[in-house]
Image (cartoon, rainbow, N blue to C red):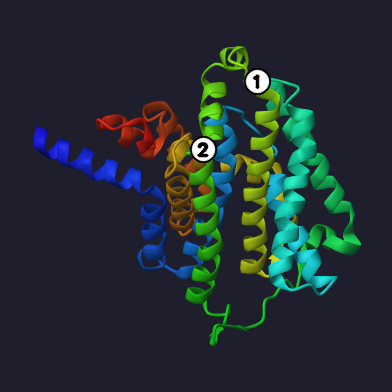
């Protein structure tokens, strides 16, 4: 039995050392283990959204209730660029990400002046302001009906025709962007910035006493988190060919919180595991009842009460692993 546990620990540590490759392999086979490809695409997009949120929540300890705004901003700015200004999809994605990051700069600048529950409430209020602005800009956003017509025609890439009407092709198209974001987050966490983030999360006053600029670090991480969530929103817009107004709603922020906690906040794999479990449960439960949110809520409460470290966090806790295995 001890040898089995030791072998598991060695395997998991090997995965941790190559965590980007490990996540990439898991996501590469995801479409073939899900009931249908659209569900796999949703898991990929919302896993990326939860990863962006987890950068702020899990690694900095800042609970935001306004991150749905960045998901919506990324989607809307990408959609508006394509529908109203006929910009190519690549440039539209860049605009969506930069726009969300700029929104993160403004929201973060105002929110980091507060702490604890006040921080959460400020982000919630600012997120709802952004929701209202896009809701009222009906000529650009479509208002209550959402923005329609966000389509990407077939294009050639090194002599190959990429047809996004094919769900498998669409999945791996989105996968490329998600993988780049995953690598980027991994680099952040392995950099001196990542160490400062964890120091602030553990003891903000001690980090400040050590000479770290706490406010600047919080703002920088807030901006990076918003940009990653904006990328998820841009990719979701291309996936759905529409940007629904509820992309900006605080319920989307709640989903990010649930996915991060369910998978394991402050862990690298956690957001994708949380997104996969939550969306899969939603897909299965809706076949039996329209009150799926009640059932998912009960399951979420079960994990919070009995597995507070989340699914992946609990696995790490049970095995003798190094800190970097997260």
**SS for callout 1:** helix
Quick check: can you spot residue 314? yes
Judging by the rendered image, the residue that carries numbered circle 1 is: 116
Asked if residue 293 lies left or right of residue 106, the reply is left
Residue 177: x and y, percent?
56, 62
Query: Residue at coordinates 85% horizontally, 70% vertically from top-left?
Result: 84
Asked if residue 67 lies left or right of residue 305, the reply is right
The reply to whether dot 1 and dot 2 touch (C-beta < 8 Å) is no
Q: Is residue 96 above or below residue 129?
A: below
Instruction: State which quadrant residue 226 falls in.
Output: top right
Judging by the rendered image, the residue that carries numbered circle 2 is: 191
Instruction: State which quadrant residue 65 falls in.
Output: top right
* Residue 98 vs residue 29, the one in the foreground: 98
Q: Is residue 39 above or below residue 86?
A: above
Residue 320: x and y, percent?
25, 30
Q: Is residue 41 above or below residue 57?
A: below
Q: Quick one: label 1, few (<14), some, or many (20+) residues within 10 Å?
A: few
Asked if residue 171 lies left or right of residue 89, the reply is left
Q: Nearer the viewer, mark 1 or mark 2?
A: 2
Query: Residue at coordinates 34% horizontally, 43% vertically from top-left?
Result: 16
Query: Residue at coordinates 37% horizontally, 39% vertically from top-left?
Result: 312
Query: Residue at coordinates 39% horizontally, 37% vertically from top-left?
Result: 326
**SS for callout 2:** loop
């Amino acid at each position: 039995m001890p040898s089995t546990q030791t072998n598991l620990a060695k395997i998991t540590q090997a995965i941790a050392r190559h965590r980007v490759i490990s996540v990439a392999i898991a996501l590469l086979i995801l479409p073939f283990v899900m009931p249908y490809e659209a569900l796999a695409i949703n898991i990929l997009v919302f896993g990326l959204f939860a990863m962006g949120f987890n950068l702020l929540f899990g690694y900095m300890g800042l609970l935001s209730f306004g991150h749905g705004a960045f998901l919506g901003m990324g989607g809307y700015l990408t959609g508006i660029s394509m529908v109203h200004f006929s910009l190519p999809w690549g440039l539209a994605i860049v605009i969506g990400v930069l726009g969300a990051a700029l929104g993160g700069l403004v929201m973060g600048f105002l929110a980091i002046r507060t702490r604890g529950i006040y921080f959460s409430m400020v982000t919630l209020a600012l997120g709802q302001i952004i929701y209202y602005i896009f809701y009222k800009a009906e000529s650009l956003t479509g208002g209550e009906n959402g923005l329609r017509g966000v389509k990407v025609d077939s294009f050639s890439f090194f002599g190959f025709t990429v047809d996004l009407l094919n769900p498998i092709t669409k999945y791996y198209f989105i996968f490329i962007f998600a993988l780049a974001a995953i690598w980027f987050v991994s680099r952040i966490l392995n950099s001196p910035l990542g160490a400062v983030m964890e120091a602030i999360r553990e003891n903000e006053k001690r980090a400040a006493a050590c000479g770290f600029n706490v406010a600047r670090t919080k703002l920088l991480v807030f901006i990076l988190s918003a940009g990653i969530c904006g990328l998820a929103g841009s990719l979701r817009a291309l996936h759905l060919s529409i940007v629904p107004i509820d992309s900006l709603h605080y319920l989307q922020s709640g989903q990010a919180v649930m996915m991060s906690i369910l998978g394991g906040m402050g862990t690298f794999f956690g957001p994708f595991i949380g997104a996969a479990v939550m969306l899969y449960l939603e897909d299965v439960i809706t076949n039996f009842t329209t009150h799926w949110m009640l059932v998912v809520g009960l399951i979420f409460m079960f994990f919070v009460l009995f597995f507070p470290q989340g699914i992946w966090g609990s696995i790490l806790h049970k095995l003798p692993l190094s800190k970097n295995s997260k």
